[in-house]
Image: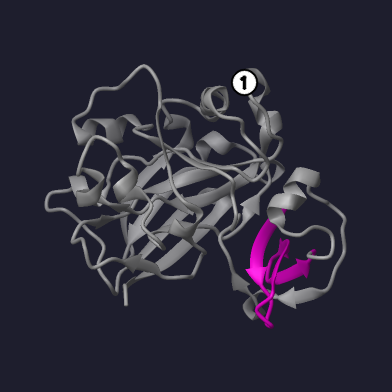
Amino acid sequence: MRFISFLRPDRSASWGRLDGTTVTDLGAHAADLKAAIAAGLPDDATGPELALAAVTLLPVIPNPGKILCVGLNYATHVAETGREQKEHPAIFHRWADSLVADGAALIHPPETARFDYEGELAVVIGKGGRRIKAADAWEHVAGFAPFNDGSIRDWQRHNIQFTPGKTWPGTGGFGPALVTPDEVADLGSQRVQTRVNGQLVQDQPISDLIWDIPTVIAYCSTFTELAPGDVIATGTPGGVGDKRNPPLYLHPGDTVTVSIGTIGTLTNPVIAET
């Protein structure tokens, strides 16, 4: 199944099940998609039907308690950065207001000329927990979605911490839908593919992750309690704009697309902050 968060035509917020171009509005069953995940996503709930074209998408989970991001999780990206592979994952965080929905514009701030893309697979936590064993981790996954960990590279490198470059308002994308695991027959074979203005710039299978999803869930749930609706962005492959020769940074007028096989495609234009 596929679930989305959206604004109705009257601009009230809701969530629902996506079937092709039809949305079943399930807002009467739970306050939002995060609450629905905590209660157990319904597979047979009914509600009013809306055309997808009539609603405005929101980020898959508009109000996650935590957004944890894994850095340097593909060997190709480790190599292009010139870093050494470490014993443990690099984890940083984003704020919820740093993300926009599929179709919405990424905001290019005036303080940088080094706005970069990072296509990734996002995992949404279904069942919360602390010190989750890797062997049990899949029981805690609600689903997947494409993610663009948009990065302001110069601010990222002001010091050794990533946060100042990773969480500017409206600089990342998350969507279009939460895709439940039963919809993805072979997750490892799905390829993370990023395109800038149609040019393929990243392309690698999820099976190439250095730390796989169960390992990441086990690691993160050791130092923090995970809750339903929390988001883990699992890392970007090699090919980021900052490490190309010449560099390929994003500018107003560009379009970035992150496609992950059967999980879906996230598309965002880039506009200047006003």
Please name the residue shown 34% across and 33% down the image: 72
Q: Position of residue 107 (x, y in %)?
A: 35, 67
Q: Position of residue 71 (x, y in %)?
A: 37, 35
Please name the residue shown 40% across and 20% down the image: 88
Three-letter amino acid code at disc 1?
Answer: Arg
Is 122 located above or below residue 63 in the figure? Answer: above
The residue singled out by tag 1 in the image is 131
Is 109 located above or below residue 174 in the figure? Answer: below
Q: Is 19 covered by the magenta stretch?
A: yes
Please name the residue shown 65% across and 79% down the image: 11
Name the secondary structure under disc 1. Answer: loop
Question: Residue farthest to the left?
Answer: 246
Residues 203 and 211: in front is: 211
Question: Residue farthest to the bottom?
Answer: 10
Q: Position of residue 1 (x, y in %)?
A: 73, 52
Q: Which residues are magenta?
A: 1-26
Apparent side of residue 160 relative to residue 73 in the rendered image (left or right): left
Please name the residue shown 32% across and 20% down the image: 86
Apparent side of residue 98 relative to residue 214 in the rendered image (left or right): left
**Magenta portion: prevailing SS class:** strand
Q: How is the image coloured?
A: one colour
Q: Is 274 covered by the magenta stretch?
A: no
Q: Which quadrant of the structure image shows residue 132? A: top right
